[in-house]
Image (cartoon, coloured by chain):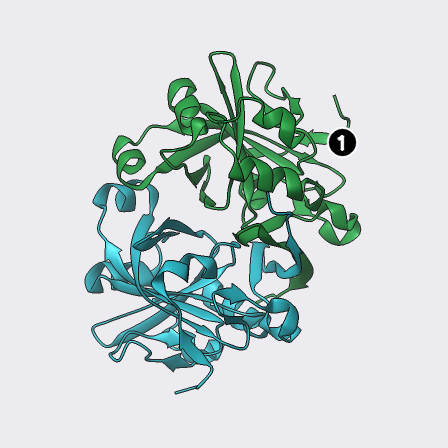
Chain colours: A green, B cyan
Amino acid sequence: MNPHIQAVALEKAYRLLNHGPTVLVSSHHGGVDNVMAAAWACALDFAPPKLTVVLDKQTATRGLIEASGRFVVQVPTVALLELTNRVGNRSLAEEPAKLLDAGVRLLRLAGDALPFVEGCSAWLECRLVPEPHNQAAYDLFIGEVIGAWADDRVFRDGHWHFEEAGPEWRSIHHVAGGHFYAIGEAMQARSE
Amino acid sequence: MNPHIQAVALEKAYRLLNHGPTVLVSSHHGGVDNVMAAAWACALDFAPPKLTVVLDKQTATRGLIEASGRFVVQVPTVALLELTNRVGNRSLAEEPAKLLDAGVRLLRLAGDALPFVEGCSAWLECRLVPEPHNQAAYDLFIGEVIGAWADDRVFRDGHWHFEEAGPEWRSIHHVAGGHFYAIGEAMQARSE
């Protein structure tokens, strides 16, 4: 395994999402892997860490997650901008070779078939917390984070280090229509 | 009123939050105004636009929103970094002069008592969509966006223009402990 991929303590896992990056959601069921992009993902709790993610009824990923009860939320980088846009615009149902065409390479960090996208800066392994009303009425899914990892070239000691990593490591933040912003300058508010 | 504050079409309101900024949540009830910071806010739907925001049980804002059924989610800028950190770290219950001390100035864009924070780049007026289970179990609140405005110096024609505005207009993205990143460089994925 890539020696730069290090476990992140669960109590600091929220920091991987707190700055609002667009994420990739990956899942596996019945021999099928899929990856989609989601801008609507958000931390929900510190301990145990939880997150929300919106999964449209049209997505193949939704069915895989409902069937398997597991998924990964991961943070793509500037280097994965085109990959992120492609997996966000194409559906596995219409393009069975979607992942191959988008250049997605998968890792298996959890020690089983759950797929993690190579080249991301951080990964959150989630157990679905079933909430049928939220899922049906709002396409809103809740995950409890049961494992977290980050690439120590950009996140280590519980902190992002974008300013010391190359620009290709920055997180990407989608607005609409393939228009993104990379995360920018670090700023520290005065202590109180 | 500031002539730069322009209405945003509701179908484009999600774009004000899509890149994951830390927001300010403001509310009013019984003659009391309050403003808090929230990193855990996220778009939920396009039309009608909806959003989620996590409001801890300790916050005074939560009570104001439950009582009034209305709130504003707004996007602070680099110029409001210290203000954002202060209203995020202090509670109105303990410091009645919190808003004054933090330098918060309020606008009344909705034509009534609902408070909007001056100097933000965008404002989303929300009607609470009551979901008692989510509120109790997860501190998770859903709002339907019923009005949206932005400052045309940084958001106009349905798009952010951070790259043409001064650096003080950038959105801010909290990680932890007063450590923020400003939003950075614009990037366009190739069309498919």
Residue A185 position by quadrant:
bottom right
Label 1 Cα neighbours within 10 Å, binned few <14 / some 14-19 / many ≥20: some
Q: Nearer the viewer, residue B92 or A30?
A: A30
Q: Is residue A13 above or below residue B177?
A: above
Point out the image quarter for the N terminus of chain B. bottom left
Place of residue A118 in the rendered image (x, y in percent of width and height, measured from the top left):
68, 29
Badge 1 marks a residue whose secondary structure is loop
Query: What residue sits 37% from the left and 81% below the top?
Result: B107
Q: Nearer the viewer, residue A174 or A114?
A: A174
Q: Residue at x 65, y 42 (%)?
A: A82
From the top left corner, tell me how far across and down residue B20 is, in percent. 51, 54
- Whether residue B176 appears in this view of the structure is no
Residue A112 seen by the camera: yes
Tell me: B176 left or right of B1: right
**Hey, what amino acid is under mark 1?**
His
Q: On the image, numbered disc 1 is attached to which residue?
A: A4
Q: Is residue A147 left or right of residue A64?
A: right
Q: Measured along the vertical axis of the image, is residue A134 above or below residue B93?
A: above
Query: What is the chain letter for disc 1?
Result: A
Q: Who is closer to the viewer here, A120 or B94?
A: A120
